[in-house]
Amino acid sequence: MSLTLDTTARKAEHAQMFIDGGWTAAGAGGSFPTVDPNTGETIAQVPRGDSADVDKAVAAAKRVAVDWQFTDALGRAALLRALAEKVTENADELARLEALDSGHYLAKAQELVGAIPIWLDYFASIADKVGGRTIEVPGNKLSFTLLEPLGVTAHIIPWNYPLLIMVRSTAPALAFGNTVVVKPAEDTSLSALKFAELVKEAGFPDGVFNVVTGYGAEAGAALAAHPDVAGITFTGSTETGKQISKLAADHVAQVTLELGGKSPTVVYPDADLDEAVEVAVQGFCSHTGQVCVAGTRLFVHADVKDEFLGKLTARLDQTKVGDGFADGTQMGPLVSKKQFDRVNSYIELGKSEATLFYGGGRPAGTPEGGYFVEPTVFTDVDNSSRIAKEEIFGPVASVHPWSTEDELVAAVNDSIYGLFAVLLGKDITTLLSTARRLQVGGVMINDWFGELPMTPHGGHKQSGTGRDEGLEAVHNYTQVKHVAINLDPLRAATDWAGAPL
């Protein structure tokens, strides 16, 4: 039986794994709770899958891998478009599951789910349009390449944007002929299970799409280490990404990683400060700061720092933090008690390392038991301090004044991370010059991050390897095969230098 949601009681039932086209409990019978971060109350019990369940899912995906590879690309595209229609038809339930499980406020969850069909349609549209190339070689020979799927691909999904991040990797994998096994984060498994139901309704063959729920150290590690998994896509912390890379290395699986970040938002002296403040707030408060690209380092030119901070205070005073299902909420809770404790520990650390400028506590009027924290800003922050260096993954920003471009670039690049940057100003020559010097995977000028399926996304340094989305995603889920054909008689065409056989 597929997942059911009671929106009034904020409870879900029948959470089961999806393997080989059917619903199943964990083989060992275990389960664990998934919690509403607005209240701390249990939403549902989720199957605690382990290596035996992973084995079943990978075996199912492997069994149908060749048939799916040789399904006509137009047929694969048609199924992805049918799935997009199913998502649209079920958008309200998907959004409510996402809001309830991950802490997104409902309007934001609805916006995110509303965008999911764009990803499915985009990769459906290029399923039959990517391929190999012909190569000019000496002699009367034909040389060309084929792009072929990897086979079984694993998708280990984080808890911050569980549905979107799952779709952005599984859509291209499916489009290019791979079969998939998804391991959602233990904190946010519900939308993946609902999505699996829609995959089945859309008509995908059994075994092409599978979901195993469970803890990372059990199901996730088993999936990354599985010898029949040819490609692994992971979004999450840098430390976990390193562990996955080591597990994948043992069977030489291809790995794509989007990992941690400590992204800068740079305010130039000629920036429109009202717009700059809005971008900054979006940058470190969106989804309560639980975003890999979160702009948690605010590099503000010294000439406008005081005015900027005054406007920032006024804007943060207007931000409504509360239950994600309450009218007008703009920022919900952190995803879990573990994350709540982690963010608060960094806030306490920041009080000893810098000056607490704004926030630092629990927002007034938020539900008891929920994992709420105020937007928090520190000033007088040394660039070598822990709150400036380490990814907090909460709505905590540090302010760094700067005066020269060389000083700015050196400070921004002084990080183990290199995921993203935002530049705000009017002199496009200066902005582009700075953009070229930053050691990051993406730069947004005079805008906040708007992820799209047609643009590549990924990081430099310890922020990851490879690129999700865009045509670059083709490389994540295909491998090159070279084919050479000799068009002349063998002896006439071949010079073996007289070597005897």
Image (cartoon, rainbow, N blue to C red):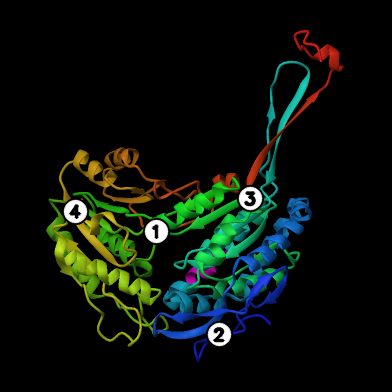
Residue at the spot 60% in from the left edge and 64% down from the top edge: 182
Labels 3, 2: front one: 3
Image coordinates of residue 212 in percent, x first then y, are: 61, 69
Q: Which residue is mark 1?
A: 292
Mark 4 and mark 1: span between their CA atoms? 20 Å
Labels 4, 3: front one: 3
The numbered mark, 2 or 4, whose residue comes first in the sequence reads: 2
Q: Which residue is mark 3?
A: 230
Looking at numbered disc 1 in the image, what kind of residue is underneath it?
Cys
Q: Which residue is mark 4?
A: 400
Looking at numbered disc 4 in the image, what kind of residue is underneath it?
His
Specify the quadrant of the image occupied by residue 193. bottom right
Crowding at dot 1, Cα within 10 Å, few <14 / some 14-19 / many 20+, comes out as: many
Labels 2, 4: front one: 2
Magenta residues? 111-116
Q: Nearer the viewer, residue 119 or 272?
A: 119
